[in-house]
Image (cartoon, rainbow, N blue to C red):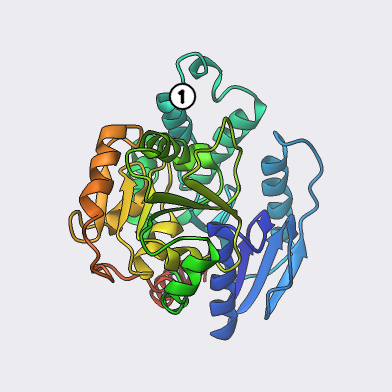
Amino acid sequence: MNIALLRRQFASVGGAELYLQRLLAALAEAGHEVHLYAEKWQGNPKGVTLHAVPVHGGRALRPLIFAEKAAAMLTQARHDVVFSLERTVRQDVYRAGDGVHAVWLEQRRRFAPWWRRPFLGLGAFHSNLRSLETRTFDPANTRHIIVNSAMVGREITSRFPFPAERIHLVRNGVDVARFQKADRIAARARFGFTPQDYVLLFVGSGWERKGLPYLLRLMRHWQELYPQVKLLVAGRGRRSGTLPHNVILAGPLTDVEQAYAAADLMTFVPIYEPCANAVAEGLASGLPVITSRCNGACELIDPGLNGEVLNDPSDLRSLEKAVLDWMPRRERPVPVSKPLDLETNVRETLRVLEMAAAEKR
């Protein structure tokens, strides 16, 4: 097939970006002709033809300008199927990897301080994105939608008139082998942990949305109570206030598998996350995972067997209890009942793309 993919930015770090890198490589290796339409990118993905989509303007207008210009460029090209990973105006298949913006704003208001709530979601950026989202979820503009969690599927059908039978669940895939080969002793030494330390791990950028403030609150509470418990943070975000001395900021890591190898328990409690790759990576590393019901990846968790799911990520008592319950349990790896591998993801994604291409013919 001749496949066009749309993504505003193609980069080397970040869960969505790494997913796209792996997907592009797998499609090219399978012999498909792959075209990537992007505003900007880092590196040159092998076997992929790159098309620059010129976008000029402020933050509020850029998503809309990209969508309109990409649509104009595609009218001049011939592709068997157009696969968008962005909110765009016309595509055969849209992957709703960013979830539903309206739901994110609702969740942000729910967990924000009372004085911030009236101001959240105001402004042209959010207005334009909601408008663009309405066009994306219009069944006249999109043939099929891929969601990476059942949670996102429910969010779409509850807010937009998109037929449920045209929504397909394809869970994220990760390079499982990558997360099983790191040396634990060397990894713990790298980050300065002793054999007695019990290491919690947080991986992600965009700390407010992904719940790091709640983990920092727990670590402040535990500084004297449990001095052997440490929190390793891998990723980029905005710091506010003094960092507890039992927290280690590692920054963005190209070899993030080392952080997983050093950890004992993954703690990732977002206020909204369509389906965090970090949860699949943690499970692939053999770690139990504590996450929240606001994360579509909670569907990978079998409570009591490979982790716990919190109803409220801001509930300190529930978070504390979940961590304490898992601390004595050292069995690794934990069992996983759903596939985590990229091959399954690519196979199921291709099935939807082929279906859409056949409908066009």
Quadrant in the picture for residue 114: top left
Q: Give the residue pinned by disc 1.
A: 112
Q: Nearer the viewer, residue 208 or 144?
A: 208
Most foreground residue, 64 or 225: 225
Let me know if residue 347 appears in the view: yes
- The image shows a total of numbered marks equal to 1
Q: Is residue 244 above or below residue 34?
A: above
Query: Quadrant location of residue 263?
Result: bottom left
Percent x, y of residue 216: 45, 38
Q: Residue at x 72, y 74 (%)?
A: 49
Q: Is residue 107 left or right of residue 63?
A: left
Give coordinates of residue 16: x percent, y percent: 54, 58
Q: Position of residue 23 (x, y in %)?
A: 54, 71
> For the point 49% across and 73% down, which residue is it?
186
Q: Give the camera-side residue of 233 and 116.
A: 233
Left of 34 or right of it: where is 180?
Answer: left
Q: Nearer the viewer, residue 319 or 223?
A: 223
Is residue 348 depicted above or below 295 in this figure? Answer: below
Extreme-left residue of the structure: 304
Mark 1 residue element: loop
| Residue in the picture at 39% in, 74% down | 341
